[in-house]
Amino acid sequence: MSQRILIVEDETDLAQILAEYLQRDGFVATTIADGLAAMAELRRAPPELLLLDLMLPGMDGISILRELRKTSDLPVIMVTARTEEIDRLLGLELGADDYVCKPYSPREVVARVKTVLRRTQGAANVVASSTPHRSALEIDADAQQARFAGKNLELTPKEFRLLQTLAGKPGRVFSRSQLLDALYEDNLEVSERAIDSHLKNLRKKLAPAFPDEEPIRSIYGVGFAFEW
């Protein structure tokens, strides 16, 4: 049975385009332009995932998300043009699973939908057959060694700790500052840009294990997340 995606967006042309892209990928997409109507629909027939615009008539997206989180762990991707709200949207206070900034590519949104669903129970059917088996990646904290499909990944201590931090909480967004704290426990004065160098090297070493995807996602202005 196709998974249902509820798109709450008051720009009707944009919502319709997004719905069409989702339908091409086998989803059932429903659009609603009003926040209060969306809240009623969520109570009546919860979808598998909610695409929720921040600015809405009737009831804004943050209010909808706050109300929803009182009773539900429904996956939510927020859509926003207000980048200053991103930290709140992804924080524990509100608990969005991901966000997309306007203007966006509909293809990018579909990819984000698949990624979030892949992280939730019962969403295995949206994982493409080319996606590596997630259990093939092993992280041995005692031996300080990472393996993929039984083969050692030749990582430096810093690269291993970086992978351990990101992959230990898949989907969570880490800022450069948080990653620095994980890598340099002695509080050395290290530039946040040092993380970029470690990430570049780690991505190269992970590339053979993930030939069809980039497991470490860069989130502009926020940080990085490991998605597997």
Image (tube, rainbow, N blue to C red):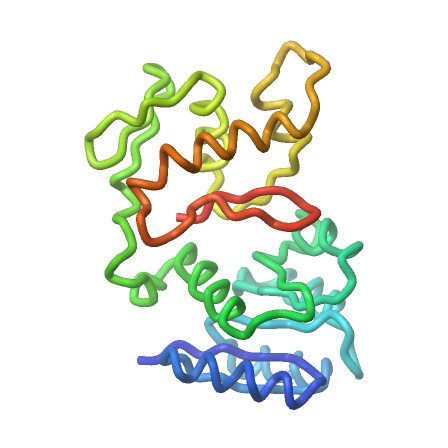
Q: Position of residue 150 (x, y in %)?
A: 19, 31
Up/down of 29 relative to 49, above or below: below
Q: Quadrant of the N terminus?
A: bottom left
Residue, x 80% and y 54% (percent of image)? 84
The answer to whether 144 appears left or right of 150 in the picture is: right
Up/down of 41 relative to 76, above or below: below
Q: Position of residue 139 (x, y in %)?
A: 34, 28
What is the number of callouts on the image? 0
Up/down of 172 relative to 124, above or below: above
Quarter-of-image position of residue 100:
bottom right
Residue, x 71% and y 84% (percent of image)? 10
The answer to whether 69 appears left or right of 170 in the picture is: right
Q: Position of residue 87 (x, y in %)?
A: 72, 49
Quarter-of-image position of residue 142:
top left
The answer to whether 113 appears left or right of 10 in the picture is: left
Quarter-of-image position of residue 8:
bottom right
The residue lying toward the viewer, choosing from 154 and 92, is: 154
Residue, x 30% and y 46% (percent of image)? 134
